[in-house]
Amino acid sequence: MAKERHWPTAAEAGAVLAMHDNLESGRSIARKTAIPESTVYDIINSHGHWGEWVTGPIARQHREEQKSILAKASRTLAAKCLEQVDKMLPKASAYQAAGIYGLMRTHERLDMGESTDNISIIAKVDAGNADGLAQRLAARMVTSGSQPTDITSDGIR
């Protein structure tokens, strides 16, 4: 006898969308919710009747409610994790403590919607390109009315 297919409720579909908004994979969502993976992907990709449901006001409401629930659960878990980190911090090396801080700061910035990619932007300006950059900046200052005093091979003076 075939097992009866489980059709997700609006709240369950809202949870699927909220988890997907939090960058969880379809496979992970299917495992956590016990909704078949194919249905999870149908909800995420708005296939079939899910396409009409996902764009409606009820879906938006459920999605926001589920996001709020997930955010609260995440904050609760983060607090427990911080307690554990605080207990173990005296035993950590300076390197480990710096790594923990960096990881925590990066995730804090992600949670606040801030960029975590600032370092890679700076890293793109290498030493070999610095002279060219200095000359372009100086030329820009000249055309905008600012006057650099001297441009040399080792920089602006």
Image (cartoon, rainbow, N blue to C red):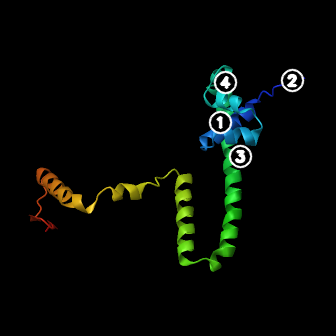
Q: Quadrant of residue 55?
A: top right
User: Residue 50 got which mark?
Assistant: 4
Q: Quadrant of residue 59?
A: top right
Q: Residues within 10 Å of mark 3 (few under 14, many from 20)?
A: few
Which callout, 3 or 2, points to the residue nearer the camera? 2
- Asked if the residue under mark 1 is in contact with the one under mark 2, i.e. CB atoms within 8 Å, the reply is no
Residue 133 x, y percent position in the rendering: 21, 56
* Residue designated by label 1: 17
Three-letter residue code for mark 1 = Leu
Which residue is painted at 65% across and 36% down in the image? 17
* Residue designated by label 3: 69
Residue in front for this viewpoint, 48 or 66: 48
Q: Earlier in the sequence, mark 4 or mark 3?
A: 4
Q: Please indicate whether residue 146 sits to the left or right of residue 22 in the image.
A: left
User: Residue 2 got which mark?
Assistant: 2
Considering every residue shown, the one lying at the far front of the view is: 1
Three-letter residue code for mark 4 = Trp
Q: Please indicate whether residue 47 sits to the left or right of residue 80 in the image.
A: left
Which residue is painted at 77% across and 30% down in the image? 9
Residue in front for this viewpoint, 68 or 103: 103
